[in-house]
Image (spheres, coloured by chain):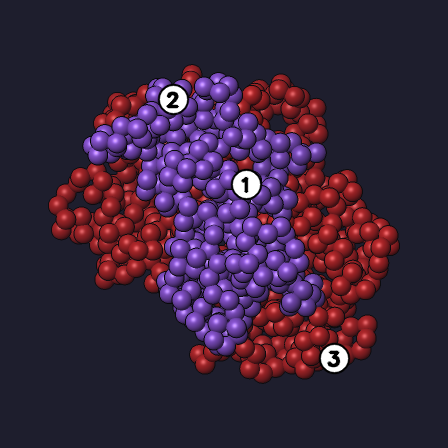
Amino acid sequence: MKVEGLTIGFGNAAPVVEDVGFSVEPGETLALVGESGSGKTLSCRAALRILPEVAQVHSGSVVFDGSNGPVDLMGLSERAMCDIRGNRISMIFQEPMRSLSPLHRIGNQVIEVLRLHGTAKGQGAYKRVIETFERVGFADPERIYQSYPFELSGGMRQRAMIAMAVVGKPDLLIADEPTTALDVTTQAQVLGLIKEIQQDNGMAMILVTHDLGVVANLADTVTVMNRGRVMEAGPAPLVLGDPQHGYTKDLFAAAPKIPDSGEEVSREDKPDYILEMRNVSKTYTLKGKAAWHPKIHVQAVRGIEFGVERGRTLAVVGESGSGKTTCARMALGAERADPGAEILFRAKPDADTVNLQDLDTSARLAFQRQAQMVFQDPYSTLNPRMRVKDALCEPMDIHKLGTRPERVDRAAEMLRWVGLSPNMLTRYPHAFSGGQRQRLSIARALMLGPTFLVCDEPTSALDVSVQEQVLQLLEEIRDRLNLSYMFISHDLAVVARIADEVAVMREGLVVEQGPTEVLFHNPQHPYTKALLAAQPEPDINRPINLKIVAQGAGSPSTWPEAYRFDGTSVPPLTEMGLGHKVRCYA
Amino acid sequence: MAMLRFAVFRLFTMLATLVVVSVLIFIIINLPPGDYLSNQINELRATGQSSGVAKAEFLRQEYALDRPLWEQYLIWMGFAPGPHGFSGLLQGEFGWSFEFDRPVAELVGGALWLTVLVNLAAILFVYMVALPLGVIAAARAKTWIDYTSAFVGYLGLATPNFLLALILFYYGNRYLNLPIGGLMDPKFEGEPMSFEKMKSVLVHLIIPTFVIGTSGAAAMMQRLRANLLDELGKPYVETARAKGMSESRMLVKYPLRVAFNPFVADIGTLLPAMVSGSVLVSVVLGLQTIGPVLLTALKSQDLFLSAFVLMFVALLTLIGTLISDLLLALLDPRIRFGGRSS
């Protein structure tokens, strides 16, 4: 496929994609790299002619040279286009959770591709779908065929999407951020799968992504886009190894990397904890199927023991469902831990220690002034109907601090701290970009002058370059105000950059914890190793080692004997070195 | 199998609800002081007609109106023996209408079926109009088709039903020779069912159906359009497009299926709304439905008649929700497997 001079615009406004061209040869992978709003997704959709109605292709040609000879897709009738879509060119979308119809069985949605294009019928079609399911790694394809999407996990759904895309044996596969919504270990496995299938079928692939690590693992050629224009294009080793264009260089600089080596930091004997969690568990009770069925208990967090040192950052890492967010909620006193737990908080080294487990109303209010939260999604955590001024002043309103002018003064000051201008006070949140919103969110958390911040994946919804800036800001503020952070994340590269100490969680348990340098360079636990191995690196010479990922990311009952969880019996946390604990039998 | 269990369970809860509703109805009807007979006795005493008093007193005893309220309720429902043994709703004895001096069953018998008929016709009309119009309006959103259908819809919503009825009667009769008033030609009343009678009923049904159904159809159409527009923006629609489905096939298979849920769920509320909403229309159009009967019965505190009619409406509502619940479970696996979702 060869795209030339593609220009797309919304209505009469200036085009958002201008004169874009790229090409992909059979069997090759082209990566379209860029940040959100760079036009990479629009270009791909234009090639399939599934743009939203308001967007129009002003000019350009998309020549597709499949098994039936070259055709210009722009000139085809809608009917002929339908024959190409799904059959010769297919697409994988970003959100596996929402890209499958919730009301139809997986098998029905996949076999439909074959039926629509008359590729196979009846039993033949069924057999082919089952084979494809096996190919994408489903252990029990017949059961998957009968399942509904909501019965599968995110990774499984993405596998089903891949099956749907390749079941018709297309000449070209367009994958639009196929792994962005997945956990790192799942991402690594899905990437491996895509690569394998591509080699098997010999199809071409266009990979749309913002993650240079993913690019390095899959792409043969790279096209970097920014603001609707192509910045740089060329073979992957060249572009990744020696970027020429300034924008590409910036992208590389911003991409967080796990450092190669680190020096041991000496630790004090008796650490000064601002927050210490001892023997903390949390059990949720779910209603049974019916009133007379027994209640179901889910242990979200089991026996956590760690502390956040004053002025430093503790990162809690784990996949979704590992209990890391529950952990954060308990650290803020928003959730009460099971009886027997102690969550001790000391605002200043010489202040009294309070136990969050038994706070009365006034003590709780005082604690909340000290501990604040920065949320994950800056788009939904700011009320769209409140001006920035009101959103920032609200915490002080609630705690009845200061007069109105004092509150506004403080809000203006906080805006300056987070790198925004005080004359933005009267704006509404929609006037801000994602990165700016996250800055607002941080400013709001700082309004009460807290000593302890819980950051719940504060950068996961942001572009790489913006992510870098927000991390920098968080570090700056921490050092300036002597704040302590509890940093929740699934992104090891981000953690490596900001954290002093890391705890890795899996199924509600800490499997390994220790100082960042130790954990990243001498990981002991198979799951930690898998997480590290799964992290895609923007270096073409260091592909993901799928074997390590598969070993550690599987169910805890398949781990090597020393680490294995066996039913309810779990290995103890064993001290391996100074502050480095691993869950294993010694 | 799970479906069957669910159906049985829902049927059971429906019956339980019906019992609760019956208690409420009985209490509410008895809330105003006095009852039809004691009012009548007072009136007779005041005018000095003592012979009538004896008859009224006799009726009071016959229908156990002199007993405490809870006993009256049990007797009315047929849970406890009255002066003539068990003879309540459960036994198929609907009681006596004092106002009309006839048994309730005889009084409302014909009207019941006509009510069900008129309202079923109206509901069918609502769905038949709202479904295609809603889908077209959503598929061609923001075009003249969309705006026209919205305009007509709002017109339908905003016009008072009885006014619409009068207008339609006038023009329907003048240009299309449609009959005015009633649900059948007077000569067929009381006649056994025949082909001719059926034809007459159907012709008479046209205007009432249209009048009662218009506002419901307009509202339903707008709801379907809004739901469908929401669904059209979802990623799975794009997936279907990328598969190479044609637009119309895709529309019917994916977003419409999802947008259908509220559409189906509305059946439950539509039935009672139609019954109570059609009272005024029935009066204006002179339809022999249950609506006007209920109105008179409530005004004169005719205990058994009004209680029976209310029970009937409640039953319709419950059957409506039962149908919509079962249909929803059939349509949407997420509801069917409520507990199993991840």
Q: Mark 1 and mark 3 in contact? Answer it, CB < 8 Å.
A: no
> A129 or B35: nearer the eye?
B35
Query: Which label is found at residue B235?
Result: none
- Specify the amino acid type for callout 3: Val
Q: Mark 1 and mark 2 in contact? Answer it, CB < 8 Å.
A: no
Against B65, is B250 above or below? Answer: below
As helix, strand or loop, the secondary structure at mark 2 comes to: helix
Q: Viewer-nearest of labels 1 and 2?
A: 2
Do marks 1 and 3 both belong to one polypeptide chain?
A: no
* Tag 3 residue: A71
The residue sitting at 78% across, 65% down in the picture is A117
- Specify the amino acid type for callout 1: Ile
The residue sitting at 79% across, 46% down in the picture is A134
As helix, strand or loop, the secondary structure at mark 3 comes to: strand
Q: Viewer-nearest of labels 3 and 2?
A: 2
- Alpha-carbon distance for marks 1 and 2? 35 Å
> B202 or A88: nearer the eye?
B202
Badge 2: chain ID = B
Left or right? Give the position of B106 relative to A196. Answer: left
* Tag 2 residue: B61
Q: Colour of chain B?
A: purple
Q: Mark 3 and mark 2 in contact? Answer it, CB < 8 Å.
A: no
**Can residue A98 be seen by looking at this rendering?**
no
- Specify the amino acid type for callout 2: Gln
* Tag 1 residue: B319
Percent position (x, y) of residue A188? 65, 47
Q: Quadrant of residue B64?
A: top left
